[in-house]
Image (cartoon, rainbow, N blue to C red):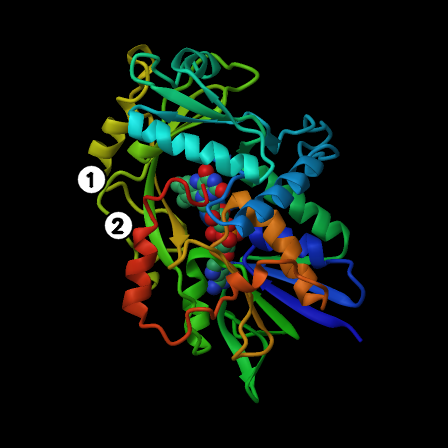
């Protein structure tokens, strides 16, 4: 008998999950997304794509390792240009990451990180300020850097490209993607989810329904009477104007004690910061895109402070300002697995690009009745059941600035 699996959300998580499940014995996979074909309305469309393997919890490190393995294998046979072949590794580039300390206290933190990386079996090397500046000359100021910690195995993802590749592979295995399909509710009978209602009044029947709907996850969950404790929060990232392209790109750079990070995008630079007053967005106030209007302050001031970390000659005027929205959770971990109180419903939300493919593989394994892997129980979406929503939201927002978290 066919097992009908419906995934709500065709971002990097939903598309990765579709590729994992499609073609498995007896599974038919349908992916619903309200965005038109080829458009990414969710957070995936905005991520500058830092992929840092060392997570704050071992389970995150494992998911990131698995994700990098999958991303590396994704682009080598991608033909996304109507005839031309994408360069191998175009979706994930092993640029490395450089964490920079500008104070002795921050250097101590880097030393601790280096030890944790070693225990996790990850390559990481402490470097002096000159070497740090040599690794990323446009981004690291040797006059203010005290030291750096270089992770050569980290990289940057082109999340949109990876999502498109995952979708093509899922489709090649028989998955169907319904574009422009807005899910408005879940069909619940006898305490079990049996499908998804669409805005046009049709019911898409399902034996299993997966919420891979990112920041919008709590809205559909609430209509089924279930709490999904993620908090959408808005985050500034700005791009400079175009400049001569450079290959290979330099490493992603993070200044943990300043809550800021920057990326060499090849033909322009970008910088993001968490060092501003929190701007949560109530799920009910979200539009259909994971983007909010640029507020001026507090983002302007925070971006100016982040830009001041760059070498004076390479500070740039923002040409594009993005106020993107992503999710935080009370313990900074994804919400991945079944809702035990509502059979037939699963969550794959609050997952970073960094962990998306590995999380999808682990969830597919769990849905297939296999061994989901150590640590996955810690990600159960109902692990906070019974705790007051306001307190969970406060805890989640406390993690926003934690640059050592997911990415
Ligand atoms: C500015 C910014 C910077 C970031 N930087 C990084 C980074 O450097 N590294 C990193 O790893 N991560 C980063 N992230 C986080 C990352 O982008 C997200 O965690 C990830 O893309 C989430 O993917 P997703 O597939 O779960 O969700 P999304 O990409 O949001 O996809 C959810 C999809 O669900 C669809 N949907 C929702 N509700 C419905 C409905 N009712 N009916 C139909 N369709 C629906 C939406 O249209 C959307 O396409 C960043 C995010 C932002 C915004």
Task: Determine which of the numbered discs, if any, sits on residue 298 in the image.
Answer: 1
Task: Determine which of the numbered discs, if any, sits on residue 195 in the image.
Answer: none
Helix, strand, or loop for circle 2? loop
Task: Determine which of the numbered discs, if any, sits on residue 279 in the image.
Answer: 2
Label 2 crowd bin: few (<14), some (14–19), many (20+), radius 10 Å: some
- From the top left corner, tell me how far across and down residue 178 is, in percent: 61, 59
Helix, strand, or loop for circle 1? loop
Depth check: give the residue in front, 130 or 80: 130
- Residue 46 in view in this figure: no
Q: Is residue 300 left or right of residue 400?
A: left
- From the top left corner, tell me how far across and down residue 181 is, in percent: 54, 62
Depth check: give the residue in front, 110 or 4: 110
- From the top left corner, tell me how far across and down residue 48 is, in percent: 46, 35
Q: Is residue 6 left or right of residue 404?
A: right
Instruction: Point out the image quarter for the N terminus.
Output: bottom right
Residue at 31%, 10% (x, y): give it. Answer: 313
């Amino acid at each position: 008998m066919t097992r009908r699996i419906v995934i709500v959300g065709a971002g990097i998580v939903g598309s990765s999950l579709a590729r994992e499940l499609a073609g498995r014995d007896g599974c038919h996979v349908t992916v619903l997304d309200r965005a038109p074909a080829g458009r990414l309305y969710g957070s995936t469309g905005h991520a500058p794509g830092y992929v840092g393997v060392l997570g704050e919890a071992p389970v995150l490190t494992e998911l990131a390792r698995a994700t990098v393995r999958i991303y590396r294998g994704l682009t080598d046979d991608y033909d996304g240009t109507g005839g031309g072949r994408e360069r191998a590794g175009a979706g994930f580039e092993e640029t490395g990451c450089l964490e920079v300390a500008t104070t002795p206290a921050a250097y101590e933190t880097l030393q601790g990180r280096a030890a944790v990386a070693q225990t996790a079996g990850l390559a990481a090397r402490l470097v002096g300020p000159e070497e740090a500046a040599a690794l990323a000359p446009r981004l690291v100021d040797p006059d203010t850097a005290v030291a750096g910690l270089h992770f050569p195995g980290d990289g940057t993802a082109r999340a949109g490209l990876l999502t498109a590749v995952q979708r093509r592979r899922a489709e090649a295995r028989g998955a169907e993607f319904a574009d422009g399909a807005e899910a408005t509710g879940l069909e619940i009978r006898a305490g079990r989810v049996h499908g998804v209602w669409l805005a046009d009044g049709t019911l898409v029947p399902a034996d299993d329904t997966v919420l891979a709907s990112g920041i919008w996850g709590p809205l559909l969950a609430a209509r089924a009477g279930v709490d999904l404790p993620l908090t959408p929060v808005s985050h500034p990232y700005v791009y400079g104007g175009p400049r001569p392209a450079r290959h290979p790109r330099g490493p992603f750079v993070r200044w943990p004690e300043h809550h800021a990070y920057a990326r060499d995008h090849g033909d322009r630079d970008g910088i993001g910061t968490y060092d501003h007053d929190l701007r949560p967005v109530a799920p009910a106030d979200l539009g259909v895109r994971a983007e909010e209007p640029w507020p001026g302050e507090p983002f302007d001031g925070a971006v100016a402070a982040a830009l001041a970390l760059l070498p004076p000659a390479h500070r740039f005027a923002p040409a594009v300002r993005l106020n993107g929205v992503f999710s935080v959770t009370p313990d900074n971990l994804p919400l991945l697995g079944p809702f035990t109180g509502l059979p037939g419903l699963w969550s794959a939300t609050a997952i970073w690009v960094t962990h998306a493919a590995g999380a999808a593989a682990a969830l597919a394994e769990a849905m297939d009745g296999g061994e989901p892997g150590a640590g996955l129980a810690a990600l159960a979406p109902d692990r906070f059941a019974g705790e007051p929503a306001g307190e969970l939201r406060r805890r989640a927002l406390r993690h926003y600035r934690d640059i050592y978290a997911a990415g």
